[in-house]
Image (cartoon, rainbow, N blue to C red):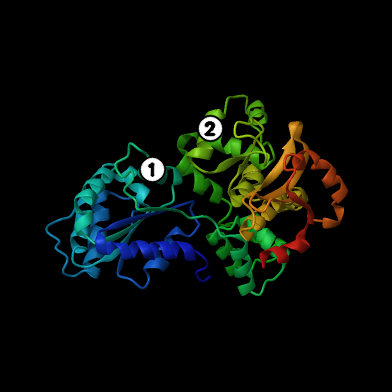
Amino acid sequence: MRFYDRQQELVELNKLMGQTKGGSRMAVLTGRRRVGKTLLSLEFAKDKKYLYLFVAKKSEVLLCEEFVADIKRSFPDAPVIGDVRSFRDVFQLLLQIAKDVPFTVIIDEFQEFYNINPSVYSEVQKLWDLNKAKSKLNVICVGSVYSLMHKIFEGSKEPLFNRADRMFMIKPFSVKTTASILRDYKVKDSAAVFNYFLFTGGSPKYIDLLVENKAFTFEEMLNFVVEANSPFLNEGRNLLIEEFGKEYGTYFSILELISVGKTGRSEIQSILESDIGGYLERLERDYAVIEKYKPINAKPNSKSQKYRITDNFLAFWFRFIYRNRSAVETGNFEYIRDVIRRDYSTYAGRVLEQFFQALFAETGKFNKIGSYWEKDHQNEIDLVAMNDMKKELVIAEVKMNKDRIDLAALKAKSKALIASYPKYKVEWQALGFEDIDRLIR
């Protein structure tokens, strides 16, 4: 699959590179694994002088041997003296070379130094502060353990706090980008665009796996995702265990419950029979795996809130793969596929609400988009979009079968909501699969 999207990030990275004429610059690319951080950094650097250094899980001495060999290949006249056994010396060498030759260095999996030698960060900070103004090095630090990258560069007590000139949070592809990819593969079916959203959450790696294996229909996707040796089966575990550490079991239990619709703190606690407030806070603040959401007109201190998993792939994985891990272990993949087929309509209905909210957000016409409900989950509304400048309000019901939507009932449910916005022009909409093409254009 060719390189898609990321044009704004490339513009900003090039702008930063241009500033190295006045001194070294540092950018940070973070985000979940499989969102294309490394690919983005290499796409940016492909027509420039650059070095790519991957921080593998090995000793610092062996890493430095590898890095020095890479440096010598690109810079034969590099002033390497004796054995280089610490990353401090490697980084000093890079800064020294860049005093004469401007170039980019990409340091991938930068957070791994926490496991190799945590003092690297303070050593890099000292060298950076001493040499930044005299050198023309463009540093791109890439990291996929979100919590650690956040701590390294945004923790106020960490040595590299405030050293990055730009922090990029790389997110999955938009719905429109996913649709563009599918069109390039001659797939124009709206259902395919939605199912890619449901199965992959817009992750470039997962999209690449599906398109390269020609999985475009629901059954083709299902058979590829749920089969022996599928790369998707252990993916959720692989993505999160390093983040969560030894307490991953509790985090996984919470995420499994959210994936099946237990979205309130009290109902999760009643099932697990323990206080999970701290876990929820860390899942949201430190790991960015979940987010809380409230009725669109709720006050900031309102306690009416729910939780959802931010990544659609992880939501799918916990709902169908992790929840049926016994069937995975015994290789009973047809059972899992049958469960997904059975529950698809109900599960997809919830995802379809998020799908249309994402599509409305991508239009750029609204400053607030969300859902609405009243006390005890009464009068729930799937989608509410507001333009406060133009005083416009869109209220919509979302269903896979649009013919089942009753606009009169929707208007009745929204009376209290529109009463809060008396000067707004209100438009009620029924949204289904047939509206996807219109909104993607």
Residue at the extreme front of the image, as rendered: 423
Q: Is residue 120 left or right of residue 371?
A: left
Residue 307: % across, % down: 62, 38
Q: Which residue is mark 2?
A: 279
Amino acid at pointer 1: Glu
Crowding around mark 1 (Cα neighbors within 10 Å: few <14, some 14 to 19, many 20+) is: some
Q: Is residue 125 left or right of residue 191?
A: left
Corner quadrant of residue 256: top right
Residue 75: % across, % down: 21, 69
Corner quadrant of residue 293: top right
- Marked residue nearer the N-terminal end (1 or 2): 1
Q: Quadrant of the C terminus?
A: bottom right
Count of picture labels: 2
For label 2, the SS is helix
Q: CA distance from mark 1 to mark 2?
A: 21 Å
Q: Is residue 213 visible in the rendered structure shown here?
A: no
Amino acid at pointer 2: Tyr
- Along the line of sight, the residue nearer the viewer: 1 or 376: 376
Crowding around mark 2 (Cα neighbors within 10 Å: few <14, some 14 to 19, many 20+) is: some
Residue 154 tag number: 1
Q: Is residue 251 left or right of residue 402?
A: left
Residue 142 tag number: none
